[in-house]
């Protein structure tokens, strides 16, 4: 199949951009290297995550799609999250095929994963550098002077695939800013608020069948019960932990942790320490104060998004 036949130049309904949750940008380099960038538009922090991997078969892209969107695709409490892959027009056929591969392949009726092409020049290093520099200058200007940050551009500068993937994603965001929701008020200020280099190896990849077997989410547990003709017991790890979360942003973060378990020992130790401290507070003299704070937090909306808007109007 020709690459032009496998990928649509743009989605059939451009207005559907307003429903996108996660956008991936992928480019293939020499000797099997691959640049990957993505941004989760539902995350209040909206971090532009970029990676450079040795991945001649583009398996990391498929795993990343499954980690971020795959579990929601099985059916969640809320509507399924929508994703999109953005590729340069001169991409290898193998990359095009992987990008368009459905999240689930249980039957022949699954539609291809939404994929679109940009001009190869939109992924060029020459355009990516000023685009990233302009974004960081804007972010640095808007950030309060009390919280300085070191620029990640120096680390990006020496890596062609990181620059190409990040630059291509930023170019897509620029071209489709209105359709992506600026006028609908989904966010204030830039679509991207931070830049971070990540490694796919930092997270444990858990395939769909393992998620179902471990009963991580209620909807996956129900799928398993129906497949085995057993009654659903209504029990999952998510159903046990979710009532303890006090805010929408906390629920999103918890779901993200369950979908993408970290393999960083230091980070896991920090989380365990936080849980121990919380348990200690709940068992101490200030337990009622902690419970009252939990009740008050439940009345609040998306706190990170509110703080971001406050910064825009300070």
Image (cartoon, grey):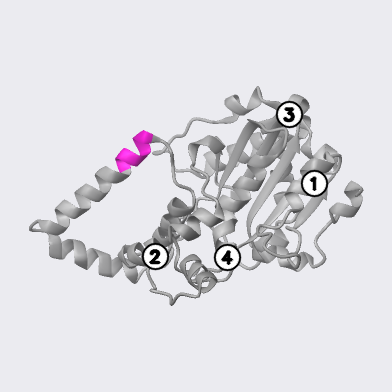
Name the residue tied to disc 1.
96
Point out the frontmost of discs 2 and 3. 2
| Magenta stretch in the rendered image | 265-270
Vertical placement of 36 versus 46: above or below?
above
Mark 3 Cα within 10 Å, few/some/many (few <14, many 20+)?
A: few
Most extreme residue toward the top, as rendered? Answer: 158
User: 179 or 276: which is nearer to us?
Assistant: 276
Mark 2 Cα within 10 Å, few/some/many (few <14, many 20+)?
A: some
Vertical placement of 70 versus 147: above or below?
below
Q: Residue at x 45, y 63 (%)?
A: 217
Which sits earlier in the primary sequence, circle 3 or circle 4? 3
Most extreme residue toward the bottom, as rendered? Answer: 231
Which sits earlier in the primary sequence, circle 2 or circle 3? 3
Name the residue tied to disc 4.
74
Res. 289 image quadrant: bottom left
Name the residue tied to disc 3.
32
Which sits earlier in the primary sequence, circle 1 or circle 3? 3
Q: Secondary structure at mark 1?
A: helix
């Amino acid at each position: 199949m020709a690459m032009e036949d496998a990928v649509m130049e743009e989605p059939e309904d451009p207005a559907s951009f307003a429903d996108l949750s996660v956008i991936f940008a992928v480019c293939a380099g020499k000797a099997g290297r691959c640049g990957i960038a993505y941004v989760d538009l539902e995350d209040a922090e909206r971090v532009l995550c970029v990676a450079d991997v040795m991945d001649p078969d583009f398996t990391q892209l498929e795993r990343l799609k499954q980690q971020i969107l795959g579990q929601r695709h099985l059916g969640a409490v809320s509507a399924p999250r929508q994703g999109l892959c953005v590729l340069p027009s001169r991409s290898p056929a193998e990359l095009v095929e992987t990008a368009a591969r459905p999240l689930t392949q249980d039957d022949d009726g699954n539609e291809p994963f939404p994929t679109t092409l940009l001009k190869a020049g939109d992924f060029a290093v020459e355009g990516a550098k000023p685009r990233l520099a302009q974004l960081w200058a804007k972010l640095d200007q808007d950030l309060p002077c009390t919280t300085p940050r070191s620029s990640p551009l120096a680390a990006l500068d020496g890596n062609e695939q990181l620059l190409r993937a990040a630059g291509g994603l930023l170019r897509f965001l620029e071209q489709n800013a209105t359709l992506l929701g600026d006028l609908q008020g989904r966010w204030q200020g830039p679509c991207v608020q931070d830049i971070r280099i990540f490694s796919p190896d930092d997270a444990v990849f858990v395939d769909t069948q393992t998620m179902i077997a471990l009963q991580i989410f209620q909807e996956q547990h129900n799928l398993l019960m129906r497949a085995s003709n057993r009654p659903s017991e209504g029990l999952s790890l998510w159903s046990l932990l979710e009532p303890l979360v006090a805010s929408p942003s906390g629920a999103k973060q918890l779901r993200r942790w369950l979908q993408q378990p970290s393999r960083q020992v230091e980070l896991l130790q920090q989380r365990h320490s936080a849980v121990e401290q919380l348990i200690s507070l709940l068992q101490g003299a200030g337990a009622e104060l902690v419970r009252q704070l939990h009740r008050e937090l439940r009345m609040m909306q998306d706190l990170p998004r509110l703080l971001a808007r406050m910064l825009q109007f300070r």
